Structure formats: structure tokens, C-alpha cells
């Protein structure tokens, strides 16, 4: 309940401050995902992190001692499927490589470091309150993602 209230307050603050420079659609989704994760008790360690030339980690967070590598997928609607289906085997491969580089750069690549890969789906239009779903512990194998419909 508190998380939903916090997201509503952020939505109304954005509407009151609409004269700011508009965000790209992807940045809008990442902003909502970050707010959502904070409302769920996550501490954000980094956003749009490029640890290597392999790609970008949208959000790196920590929740109860576990590192989260979060991919944010934003869509205006679900006419062509859920946003999670866009996390292809190639994207998962890039995420694994980038996360391993980040862990190595921060000297966390050992057996004691607990981490996982999540996806936050943001569905909606800028200027409206989006629907946000947090898919935890996504399968990082190279098989195609499951058909969710």
C-alpha cells in the first residue's frame, strides 16, 4: 500500500513540474522503475552503468544483501506482448557479461557475493501512472523467454 501511495505522489509531482525538459520514453520508464524499486526497499547503487563495451546495466541495486542487476523494459501498451519477451538470448548474454565485468571491477567476483538478474516492466504513457511489474530471478540461460500469453 505504501509503495503505491509513494508512486502516486511521484506521479503528481511530475505533473506539477511538467515544464521540465521532457524525458525520452526509455528514460521515463527507467525513472519509474527506480522509484518503484526504492519503494520496495532497494538501495540504488548505479543507473545506466557501462562497465565494459559489452553493453549497459540499466539499474544496479541492493536488497537485503543481494545485488540486483535490473533490466528495464518500457512499452506504451502490450499489443505485441509483455515487455519481458524483449529480453532475448542475445540481451541476456550481454547482461551476464556486463554484470561479470562490474563484479570484477568492484572486487565482488567471489563465492560469497549473492546476485540475481531481474526485469522491471513499465507499461503506460508519459503523463499517466504506469503499470509496473517486477519479474525477479529471470532465467539467464540462452533459451528463448517463455511465452507469457
Image: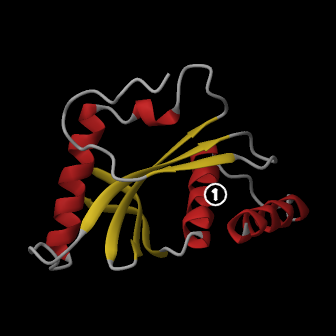
Residue located beneath label 1 in the image: 32
Looking at the image, can residue 95 be seen? yes
Residue 143 or residue 96, whichever sits in front: 143
Q: Residue at x 81, y 68 (%)?
A: 9
> Can see residue 53?
no
The part of the image, by quadrant, that contains residue 3 is: bottom right
Residue at the far right in the pictured view: 16
Taking the view exactly as shown, the residue that stands out farthest to the left is 111
Q: Where, quadrant-wise, is the N terminus in this rendering?
A: bottom right
The spot of residue 42 in percent (x, y) is 49, 73
Name the spot of residue 61 as percent of width and height, x first.
41, 70
Label 1 sits on a secondary structure element that is helix
Task: Please tell me which residue is depicted at 17% across the width and 61% down the height of the picture.
Answer: 100
Q: Position of residue 8 (x, y in %)?
A: 80, 62
> How did the renderer colour the structure?
secondary structure
In the image, taking residue 15 as reference, residue 82 lies left or right, namely left
- Judge from the rendering whether residue 45 lies leftward or rightward of residue 5; answer left or right: left
Residue name at image x 74 percent, y 40 percent: 125
Q: Is residue 43 above or below residue 149?
A: below
Q: Residues within 10 Å of mark 1 (few under 14, many from 20)?
A: many
Q: Give 135 or 23, whichever is nearer the viewer.
A: 135
Residue 70 horizontal/vertical position (percent): 40, 56
28 w.r.t. 77: above or below: below
Vertical placement of 40 versus 129: above or below?
Answer: below
Quadrant housing residue 122: top right
What residue do we see at 55% from left, 19% from top? 80
How many numbered discs? Answer: 1
Amino acid at each position: 500500500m505504501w509503495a503505491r501511495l509513494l508512486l502516486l505522489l511521484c506521479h503528481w509531482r511530475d505533473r506539477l513540474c511538467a515544464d521540465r525538459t521532457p524525458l525520452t520514453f526509455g528514460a521515463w520508464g527507467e525513472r519509474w522503475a527506480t522509484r518503484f524499486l526504492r519503494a520496495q526497499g532497494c538501495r540504488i547503487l548505479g543507473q545506466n552503468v557501462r562497465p565494459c563495451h559489452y553493453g549497459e546495466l540499466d539499474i544496479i541495486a541492493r536488497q537485503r544483501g543481494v545485488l540486483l542487476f535490473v533490466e528495464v523494459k518500457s512499452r506504451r501498451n502490450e499489443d505485441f506482448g509483455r515487455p519481458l519477451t524483449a529480453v532475448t538470448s542475445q540481451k541476456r548474454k550481454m547482461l551476464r557479461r556486463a554484470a561479470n565485468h562490474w563484479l570484477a571491477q568492484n572486487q565482488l567476483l567471489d563465492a560469497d557475493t549473492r546476485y540475481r538478474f531481474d526485469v522491471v516492466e513499465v507499461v503506460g504513457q508519459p503523463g499517466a501512472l504506469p503499470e509496473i511489474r517486477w519479474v525477479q530471478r529471470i532465467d539467464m540461460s540462452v533459451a528463448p523467454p517463455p511465452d507469457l500469453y
